[in-house]
Each structure stands twice: as C-alpha cells, then as structure tokens.
Image (tube, rainbow, N blue to C red):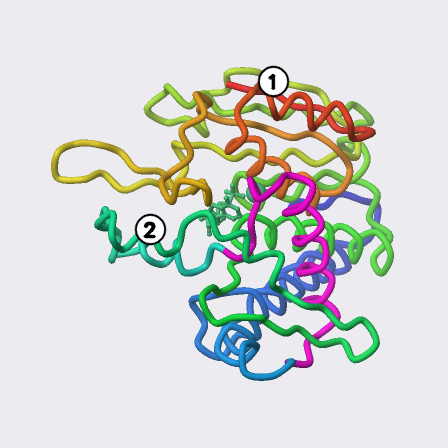
Amino acid sequence: VQVYGRQSQEALDGAVEAAMDRARELEQIFSLNIDSSEINYVNQNAAKAPVHVSDDFYTVLERSLYFARLTEGAFDPTLGKLIRLWGIGTDDARVPEPEEIAPLTGRCDYEHVLLDEQAHTVFFENDGFSLDFGAIAKGYAADEMKELLQEDYHIDSALLNLGGNIITIGNRPDGKPWTLGIADPSSPQPEEDPAVTLQVTDLTFVTSGDYQRYYEAPDGTRYHHILDGSTGYPADSGLSSVTIITQCSMDADALSTASFVLGQEKAQKLLQSINGVEAVFI
Ligand code: AMP
Ligand code: MG
C-alpha cells in the first residue's frame, strides 16, 4: 500500500495501517485457510439450515451469484470442492482421478445457493458443494481499502498492489497518471517483465493467468489454478492471461477469472456488453 499526500508522515502511516487492518479483517471472513473464518463456518453449516452472515459476506456472495449467472458458470463461486480436490497452490496439489472429478463437474450449484435479504441468511439446497471466493475476494478487499483511504483518510493519491490485483487512487503524486505493466506470461519472471504498459488514473487492473499458480506433475505437465466447472479440469481456452481494467475491483476480479475460462471470443462479447470495462488478452 503506497499512499501520498501533504498529511504528516504519521497520518499517512496511520492510513496505511488502517487499510491493512481492513484487509486482515476481510481475511478472517473469506480465507479458507483460517479454520475459524466465516466462509468455513458457512460451508460447514449452510446445507443444514440458513446461516446468518456478515454484510461483507453477503455483499460478496450476492455479487458472486450475479456473475455466475451472467457468465453461465464460467465464474462460479460454488467450485470449492473441485478446487480443494485439485489443491493447486497447496502442498496437496495432485491430478485427481477422472472418477473423483466427475461428480463435481457440470453442476451449476450457484443456482442452489439461496439468499434471504431480510433475514441476511444463506442456505445451500444440497450438500454437494462449497463456496470458494478465491476469484473475487481480493477485488472486494481492494475496493474496501481504497474506499477507506479516500473516505476516512482523505487520500487522493495511492497505489495498492494485492498481487495480480492493483487499484489506484487518483494520479501519481506528481500529477501524472500511474504507469502499470501487464506481466509477460512467457517470461521466466512475468511480474518483472511487462508485455504492455498502460497509463491509468483512478482505475483497477486485475489479471488472471495460468502462470500465477500451478502444479507441475511428475511428467512435467503444468496444471494451473483456474478451473472450468463444466469439464472439472483447468480451463484450456487458449489464453495465457486476461487483464480487466475498470473502476470496481470486485467486478474486475470476477470478470478476469470468467474471461480466462471463456476464452477471447466469448469473453470479448461479454465484456463489450458491460459499460466502462476494458481488457487485455495475452
Ligand atoms: P483468479 O486468480 O482471480 O482468477 O482466481 C483464481 C482462484 O479462484 C483459484 O485459486 C480458486 O480459488 C478460484 N477459482 C478457480 N476456478 C474458478 C472459477 N472458474 N470460478 C470461480 N473461482 C474459481
Ligand atoms: Mg478473479
């Protein structure tokens, strides 16, 4: 988190710390790696009876279901069991047997998550799935950190880099737009080697790519972390990365993942139907 302003060093440090605190708070809600997280509680209980959830959880889940329907499941927050089966990015990563993958494929469980706005509850209509917000929670965190910096700390120049997910406030301190690079997936160090650089003001940049997290099987085949719920395997749409550039980082995050699964042609069609969204496909 880099913030710039005429405030005292102490005030700026306080702003950064508050933004980090907000991120840590959201981690306690959305992380599957924290046993006591809200998402783990919901996954363990929502098929038994409706579970009351926090505002943050409700907001992200509702938006996730919206994008699942919009993309016909290319982005699907109910792939938790399939994602866990592959374990890509964890020490338990492996290539599952086809018999293990089949029951978790082609399910469209996002149609079986029931939200009650009045009661603020979530209910799963069956216990064959679980939630995973890995493709959207970071975007939400970026939006929330930005809003906090602007509203509570009056920051008008900042750069937040959450890893594959960048959000900016205003311009650079010298008044020029931020210059951001899109990683070159074919480079040994993609993040250090931009394929494209763009000048942006007050926008978010979210990338989904096959080089970010993957498992290399003993035979040398690479399996990356973005799964296609219709096949049960890592998406194979001919793209190496998709970067979405827009204002809302949560939306960009969902759309980058969905676009990666859909492939360039279908993604372009989808993105052209949404106002204020631009994309770079590699
Ligand atoms: P991202 O880097 O934003 O594209 O998100 C990838 C992460 O989201 C993965 O590590 C999984 O936790 C989860 N995920 C994988 N495939 C999908 C998918 N098709 N829809 C939604 N989430 C997914
Ligand atoms: Mg995403």
Q: Compared to 36, does 178 lie above or below? A: above
**Residue 118 located left or right of residue 215:** right
* Residue 61 image point, x, y percent: 66, 60
The residue nearer to you, when weighing 28 against 151, is 28
* Residue 72 image point, x, y percent: 61, 41
**Residue 15 located left or right of residue 261:** right
**Are there few (<14), some (14-19), or many (20+) residues within 10 Å of tag 1?**
few
The residue type indicated by label 1 comes to Thr
Disc number placed over residue 197 in the picture, else none: 1
The residue nearer to you, when weighing 213 against 144, is 213
**Are there few (<14), some (14-19), or many (20+) residues within 10 Å of tag 2?**
some
The residue labelled by disc 2 is 102
The residue type indicated by label 2 comes to Ala
- Image label count: 2
User: Which stretch did the figure color magenta?
Assistant: 51-78
Q: Tell me the SS state at disc 2.
A: helix
Assess whether residue 72 is covered by the magenta stretch: yes
* Residue 70 image point, x, y percent: 69, 41
Which quarter is ligand 2 in? Answer: top right
**Residue 170 located left or right of residue 48:** right
Q: Residue at x 42, y 67 (%)?
A: 33
Q: Residue at x 38, y 32 (%)?
A: 211
Name which of mark 2 and mark 1 comes first in the sequence.
Answer: 2
Camera-near label (2 vs 1) is 2
Assess whether residue 184 is covered by the magenta stretch: no
CB of residue at label 1: within 8 Å of ligand 1?
no
The residue nearer to you, when weighing 269 against 167, is 269
Q: Tell me the SS state at disc 1.
A: strand
Instruction: Kindly indicate whether the residue at mark 1 contacts the one at mark 2 (C-beta within 8 angstroms).
Output: no
User: Which residue appears farthest toward the top when viewing the image?
Assistant: 196
